[in-house]
Amino acid sequence: MPEASPFLLACNRQAAPVTPVWFMRQAGRSLPEFRALRERYSFFELVASAELTAEVTLQPVRRLGVDAAILFSDIVTPLASIGIEVEIKSGTGPVFAEPFAGEADLSRLRPLEPDLDLAPVLDAVRILVQELEVPLIGFAGAPFTIASYFVEGGPSRDYARTKALMLGEPELWGRLLDRLADITIASLRAQVAAGAAAVQVFDSWAGTLHPDHYAAHVLPASKRVFDELADLGVPRIHFGVTTGELLGHLAAAGADVVGVDWRVPLDRAWQRIGDRAVQGNLDPAILGAPWAVVAAEADAVLGAAGGRPGHVFNLGHGVLPGTDPDVLARLVDHVHERTAAR
């Protein structure tokens, strides 16, 4: 993999020959070849096999021509690997058999030993770096988002239990986030040691928080994650949904690249983020519209970026299950063609 890949150049705010493109959730549910595998294997059976993980990760690179691959896994994989019972339910997401209920549950979060606990994941990374011609992105969940799943027992509309714990028992909340930060750091460092060229930290549900609550109760743990990855020398990406009012805080956590969802125009988001690269931010629902609409909306995103170095084209969230892969491939070509002549 050439170090001067468009993706790595953009992450480092250097001029790239084209604006690089990759898609969150590009590996998975929208691809028929992935659905064929899911008919034979459960999610965790796929993740437990280095070869199958590598295959699913490679599928969108072959089909779509994206400028980066992202490891196929889930943010709760490290918790499952240390014995926390969790199921990935189709159409729902992670569901915990025994949600976090109090002090005693901290003992369930033992330190992660990546070489033992994540051996198939790391073997998959090693396979992929030998086969890929584009950078591989490793990833993990941010402490808040993992905590929200663990406390709620699964996805939530209001995060009432999470917020009650965070504000009502801040000392216990802080200890929970510290344990989860340790797990995230260990996982990401191991992925980079195995060959990942960049990492993304998903704080998908941080946008549910008031900015002051995020700053007081979440930012310290997220900042420690990014601080303890700084010596690795790889781009660090930070992403959340509905985080328009938190973009400054996401940048303050220390990432090199801040992901932006579709609710904030990219130029306005960049003003809030400051001197960092940005990633985003086409609304994934638009991909179901006629091609002329998709192209126009993609051009609007590129226009908001203004041709400045440091833009990684992506969706504002993950690829939706019903998305036509041919539209994704056409979008990659469109962005490359539009930006090659800059």
Image (cartoon, rainbow, N blue to C red):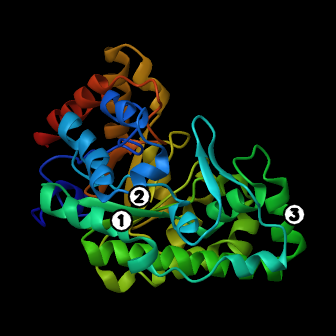
Circle 2 residue: 48
**Amino acid type shown at disc 1:** Pro
Q: Could you tell me how far apart the alpha carbons at marks 3 and 1 are, in whole angstroms?
A: 37 Å
| Tag shown at residue 120 | 1
Question: Seen in the image, is 137 located left or right of residue 221?
Answer: left
Question: Seen in the image, is 214 located left or right of residue 104?
Answer: left
Residue at figure coordinates x 42%, y 16% from the top left: 289
Residue at figure coordinates x 47%, y 82% from the top left: 113
Q: Nearer the viewer, residue 241 or 129?
A: 129
Residue 27 lies in quadrant = top left
Residue at figure coordinates x 11%, y 50% from the top left: 17
Mark 2, secondary structure of its residue: loop
Q: Nearer the viewer, residue 138 or 281?
A: 138
Which label lies toward us, 3 or 2? 2
Dot 3 crowding, Cα within 10 Å, few <14, some 14–19, many 20+: few
**Relative image position of residue 109 (x, y in whole percent):** 65, 77
From this viewpoint, is residue 11 visible?
no
Residue 329 higher or lower than 160, as above or below: above
**Relative image position of residue 14 (x, y in whole percent):** 20, 63
**Amino acid type shown at disc 2:** Ala
From this viewpoint, is residue 142 visible?
yes
Contact (Cβ within 8 Å) of mark 2 with mark 1:
yes
| Tag shown at residue 164 | 3
**Relative image position of residue 322 (x, y in whole percent):** 45, 23
Residue 224 lies in quadrant = bottom right
Mark 1, secondary structure of its residue: helix
Dot 2 crowding, Cα within 10 Å, few <14, some 14–19, many 20+: some
Q: Earlier in the sequence, mark 3 or mark 2?
A: 2
